Structures are given as C-alpha cells and as structure tokens.
Image (tube, rainbow, N blue to C red):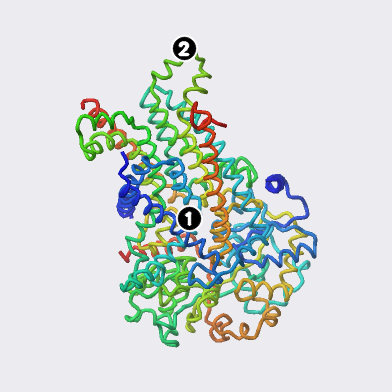
Amino acid sequence: MRKFKWSNLYLILTFIVLYLPIGYLILYSFSEGERMTNYRGFTWRHYQELFADPRMIQIVLDTLIVALLSALIATIIGTLGALAINNTTRPSMRNTILSLNNILMVSPDVIIGASFLIFFTALRLPLGFTSVLLSHIAFSIPIVVLMVLPKLRELSGSLIDAARDIGASNVQVLKDVIIPFITPGIFAGFFMAMTYSLDDFAVTFFVTGNGFETLSVEIYARARQGISLEINALSGIMFLFALVLVVGYYFVQQGQSARKTKKRGVTR
Amino acid sequence: MAVGSNRLSASTGDTGGNTLNLANWGDYIDPKLIKKFERETGFHVNVETFDSNEGMYTKVKQGGTDYDLTVPSEYMVAKMRKEGLLVRLDKSRLHGLSNFGTAFMNRSFDPDNQYSIPYFWGTLGIIYNDRYVRPGSIQHWDDLWARKYRGDIMLIDSARDIMGMSLVSLGKSVNTTDRPTLVAAKAKLDALTPNVKAVVADEIKMYMEQDEAAIAVDWSGEASEMLGENKHLHYVVPSEGSNLWFDNLVIPRTAKHYKAIYAFLNFMMRPENAAQNAEYVGYATPNDKAKALLPAAVRHDRQFYPDAQTMQHLEVYDDLAPKVVREYNDLFLEFKMYRK
Amino acid sequence: MTFNSVWYALLITAATLLVSYPAAYFLHYTKHKQLWLLLIIMPTWINLLLKAYAFIGILGKHGALNNLLGAMGMAPHQFLFTDAAFILVAAYIEIPFMILPIFNAIEELNEGLVNASKDLGASGWQTFTKVVFPLSLSGVKSGVQAVFIPSLSLFMLTRLIGGNRVITLGTAIEEHFLTTMNWGMGSTIGVVLIVAMVIIMLLTSERQHRKGRVIHRA
C-alpha cells in the first residue's frame, strides 16, 4: 500500500510551494527596510511597531471575532440546509436549490457587497459589526452546504433504516448516526467559512462602517501608501499562532479519540 | 476577548458626542497626531479607511455610515458637492485658512473653498531609474514614445490620468470632452503599446523599488515613497503640463459631531501639525506655513514642489459629465486590450 | 474579453487539477492525513494581497527566483506579466479549494473495492483508472466548480501579476462597480457569470449520471 518515495516527494514539493510565499513574507517581517524587496538585515522593529499600535490590534480582534462567529453560525445553518436539500426527493427541486446556492458562490464579491449595502441601508440597519457579520454568514453558507452535501450522499439509507428499525427516534438518528458520519464535512465547511471570512475584502468594504474594520479592508486601504512590514509581522504572528493552534488541537483530539475508541470527531 | 467584546458594544451602538469619525485613505495620517489631538481636546477619533474615492462615495451616498470627515480627491469633491452630499464649511469657526498657499485655494472643483480644505496635493509625472535611463534624458511626455524604451514603461491603471497624459502630449487639455480628440489621444496611446510593460496600480511602487521597470507614470505621492526606498529613482513633472491633484478634508452629509469636526480641522491646519503630518505621509502640503517648517532639502525639492513655471501649466481635473467619463474609461479599456 | 476569461479560467482550472489530484491522492495514504489537510488549507488564511506581493518579490526581475537561477549560472528571465506567472499564481491561490473536495471523495471511497480490484489481478495503474478515479469524480466535479467559476471573476491578480495584459470578466465588473460606477453594466456581466455557472452545473451533473451507469454495468 505504501509507495513511499515518489508520493512523499511530491507532497513535500507541494508543501514547499504552498508555504514559500508565506515564508518569504515572514522573512521580510525581520527586514530593516520598509518593503518586501531587498532584504536589509535583521530587526525586531516591525514587531515593536505592531504592538505599539492599539488600532491594529483592535482590528485583528474584530477580524477574528467576525471570522469565528460567522463561520460557526454559517456552519450550523449550512449543515441544516444541506440536510434539507438531501431530504428533498424530487431531483429537479434539488437541482434548483443547489443552483440558487451556487449563485452566491459565483457572484463576484463586489456585486454581493454592493447588494448587501443597498439591502442594509434600505432596512436602516447601521453599518458596522452586525452588518459585516450578517454578510459574512450569508456568503459562507453556500460553501458549508457544498462541503456537507457530498458526505450526506455517501451516507447509505440502510444505515438510517437500521437505526430506525432498532427504535431510534428522528433526533437520535440525527445525533448518533448522521451527525457523526458527516462531521468531517462539517469541519471542512467550518474551516472554509473561516477562510472566506478572513480573506474577504470586497464585501466587507461595502458593508462596514462606524469604525468597525477587518484586517483585509485595512490592508487594501494601505496599499496606496505601500503596505508596511508591520503587516508582515502581524501576518507572521497570526499564522504561527494558527499553526500552533491547529497542530495542538489535532494532537489533543487524537489523544482523546485514541482513549475513547467509540467515534471520531464527536468529542466536544 | 474582553477587549474585543467591549469594542463590539462600542462599534454597534451609538458612539456618543465625544467622538469624531474620520474616513481616510489607509495610513494617510500620522497616528501620533491623532493621539495628540485626543489628548489636547478629549475627543476620541475613530479612523476608518477606504481605498478608492468611488468606494467612499458609494457609502456616503447610501448612508448607514456616520462619517464626520472624509478625504476625497478634487474631482470627487466636485461630484459630491453637486449632488448635495457635502456640508458647507462655517468659516467663522475655522482658524488658519490663511496658512494655505494661493495656488491651492479657490480652484474650480470648489470655488471659494466653500466645502473643502486642501489636505495634500501632488502631480502626475514620470519616474525613471538612473541605472537604465540617462538622467535628464526624459523631460517631456513625448520622450516616453522613444523606441529605445521598448517594454520598459509601467503605467498607472487610471483612465483619467493616462488619457490625460496622452492629451497633454498632443497639446490638449486634460479636461478635453470632444470625442475626436479623445479618440486621437487613444490612438496615440496605442502607439505607446510596444513600450508598455504593464498597467498596474498601487503595486507600481513595489515594482519600481525593486528595479522591475526602468520608467513609470505615476502620482507624485507614490513617487516620493519610491524615491525614499530606491536612490536610483527620480521624478519628473513634464514642464508642458500635467495634472495637479488635491486630497481635501470635507464634511459629508452624514456628519454629526460638529464640535469635534471643527476642533480637528483647526488642529490639522496648525503649521506644526500639518508639517508633522507631511513628514509622516511624505506628500506635499498645501499649507505654506507648514512647508516653511519642513527641512530645507524637502522644501527645495523641485521634484515635489515644482517651480512656478511648471506649476502654471498644471491642470486640475474637472468633474466631467458621466457620459464623458464613460468615454474616457471605455477608450482606456480599449487601449489596455489593444496590447493583446 | 469573455472568451479570454473562459480560456484563462480553463487553463487555471486544468493546472490546479493537475497539481491537486495527485496531492489529494497521496495525502490519503499519509499517516496524519487530517492534519496535513488542515496545513494545506492554512496558507489561504494569509491575505491574498500580501501573498501576491510576496510573489512579486519572488518572481521579479531581481527577485528570489532569478537570484537562484543566477546562482546556477542562468540568465535572468522576465517572469512577471507573463501568462505563465499569472496562471501559476492563480493556481497557487486555488489549489487548496481543489484538494479539499477531491481528498474528501477519495476518503469516502470504499477501500474494499480497491483491494477487490487488486485481488482480481488488476495492476496498480488499472485499479487507479478503473476504480479509484471514476469513484472520486464527484470530488473532482465539485473541485472544478469551486475553482473554475471564481477564476472567471479573478480581478486582483490580473492586474498585480498579469499587469492588465489579461482582462477578465471580473476585472470588468470591478471596474464598473468601483471606477465607472456603472452598476447596471457590472450587474449585467454578473448575470452572464451566473448563467455560465448554471450551464456548467447542468453539464457536470449530466456527465455524472452517465458515469454512474457505466459503473453499475461494470
């Protein structure tokens, strides 16, 4: 089963390419210069500037809160939506819903952002945290649906029938059979939703206001002046932090599931 | 997390009377000045950033924001003024308008400065790298068409500016509206195509700093940043004419906190503050008293404070009719596609 | 412009798929596969603009790549503003979005089928082409959907890395919304994109049906 050499080499190369630009920009966060060109010797200066900039730290916190909350809510709504789509029996109906789902995925961000701006201002909803959160939830739901749905399709009907036969209620079927089975899809959806939220610029730009700002908007706004290496320092810190978190979480989870050999993924 | 949740309540609810909501370009004010202003006056400043005039305009027009002050470029001041999106300045509450140079006041986009106070100004010009271009050999727009600069030039991705450059090189105004002249300007741009390496935006700075191209057409503000990073770069404002642009402080219709607004405007007009801001941002200040406080090397830098004769040939963009603006954009898009 | 957009989106999707499929497949056989998968997604958490700037630094005339080539005695190349650079960076951005669905599809694949195929004397290659690949097509399909359509509307990279040599539908939309402020025209192009997506959905779902039948017969 294990054809070690070539496949591992390929994966290592893939990882190198994926992490090359990130390594590059972290390297430059230690450069004495002001830009990501011509490395000029080691310094901690950009990190000091970063920590002396309370506005930047506030923006990071705002960004993280929006990303986590919107991903969480979008995952819940998206998973329920996927369950509902999976339960529709008529294929034409299902295809229509799926197409509607995908329209949000394909609409360019600027259009979604402008539409949300018109929508929120028509409702007289003040722009700020709430409007950003709502729009992030909205554009994250389709990706969650797309991640969860294939898992639901893999789930064989006989498994559910069996559970019913031995007297499981609907809630029990959902909780003990369906959810554990689709958990990998749910996690994938959550991560993708976070990714979308962290990366979004165009939508957030339109719907934010009243001093609320996310990191992407700030970075784009700074482009006119040139992005300072402070941003590199910040990205470096956030990235390493996320890396430690993800790796740490993974091994903690591994340890737990090794102890309780019942199911994977439902240890919450 | 605790900080974050405090912040949430602050940013969703009303911000009270002690605040000032400033919508500004990214990194376009010295943060130390904001701290100083807050200490001095007790007002709290919320800075929100935007990256294009049009984006900012859309949000002011749609409402839902609470901007007290914003910083549009001159053509956008004219547009917002005409559409009733700006609040007239109460000059009796402003102290220091006399600090500004006469060249920067009472321009066509805002006669008598009824709505706007200039914040920074600049030009459109040519940046060249003396490792690839002999110093002094580029003085005029027409020099860019020389055959030896094949694939050497980067253009800023802005219809008005690049069309304007071509118009000036034809001896026409940057505010030309008649179609035949615009078409001729576009045809002249097509002839520049072999020399054009790329049409890019903010990233032009990074490209020039790392010697990616020998020549670029860009704004003076950007140029001053590049020159600070790469000592081989030089900036030229062609003497036959170019664009003179302004970024201006204005009060949008959404403003609420007038006390804070006027305190801030007066604070920013004070020479020592305007000078500090100019040093931080690196753009040219219209505040003559502030300019006098800048180091001599900056004050006498012809690149960024051009001589009187060149200044005379500089034109400010008028707010053209939407139909004409579309014409500029369509022709520019055609030029970009012509490269294929 | 439309044709150009579609053509580049196709190239980007093909390049992404070419890199991602083997990666997803090999990933399936690694030890801590879920962890590696997370690590593949994580680069997407870094701001796109920053990554693009890093690429400018790497691919530039005096950038890291040319320095490396120079050290190996090769003349510097112009990488930026070429089609290859544009497709490379666009594919780089999209790879995680392709790997994830393919990986999930391979994960779901019944290992018994693979073993059965081997027991029946199929070679590794035969097992792959006749069993693994057809069964992972649903993942490929959602991966293609997740990459192709966003590629149609890429706008940042066309300018940053492509130097506006490539004008895509996304560039046009962005321009209509943020420069010309002609929202009507921008939205019209958006509708074209949506129609394109519906067509792609219909095409891909039909193909899947046919494949499904083939598998049943086999």
Picture coordinates of residue B206 (x, y %)? 48, 69
Direction from residue C176 to residue C214 in the image, left or right: left
Instruction: Name the residue type under label 2.
Output: Ile
- Crowding near pointer 2: few (<14 within 10 Å), some, many (20+)? few
Image quadrant in which the C terminus of chain C is located: top left
Could you tell me if residue B110 is visible in this image? Answer: yes
- Please determine whether, in this image, residue C28 is positioned above or below residue B220: above
Q: Nearer the viewer, residue C191 or B178?
A: C191
The amino acid marked with disc number 1 is Leu
Labels 1, 2: one chain:
no
Q: Is residue C196 visible?
A: no
Q: Position of residue A242 (x, y in %)?
A: 55, 49
Name the element at disc 1. helix
Say which residue label 2 marks: A166
Determine which quarter of the picture holds residue C92.
bottom left
Which residue is at the front of the view, A13 or B181?
A13
Q: Chain of mark 2?
A: A
User: What element does badge 2 sit on?
Assistant: loop
* Horizontal side of residue B327 vs B94, given as left or right: left
Q: Quadrant of residue B30?
A: bottom right
Question: Against A162, is B177 above or below?
Answer: below
Looking at the figure, which quarter contains the N terminus of chain C? Answer: bottom left
Which residue carries the number 1 mark?
C48
x and y percentages locating residue C122 in the rendered image: 20, 34
Q: Is B234 drawn above or below residue A156 in the view shown?
A: below
- Image position of B42 (left or right of C147): right
Residue for point 47% across, 83% down: B240
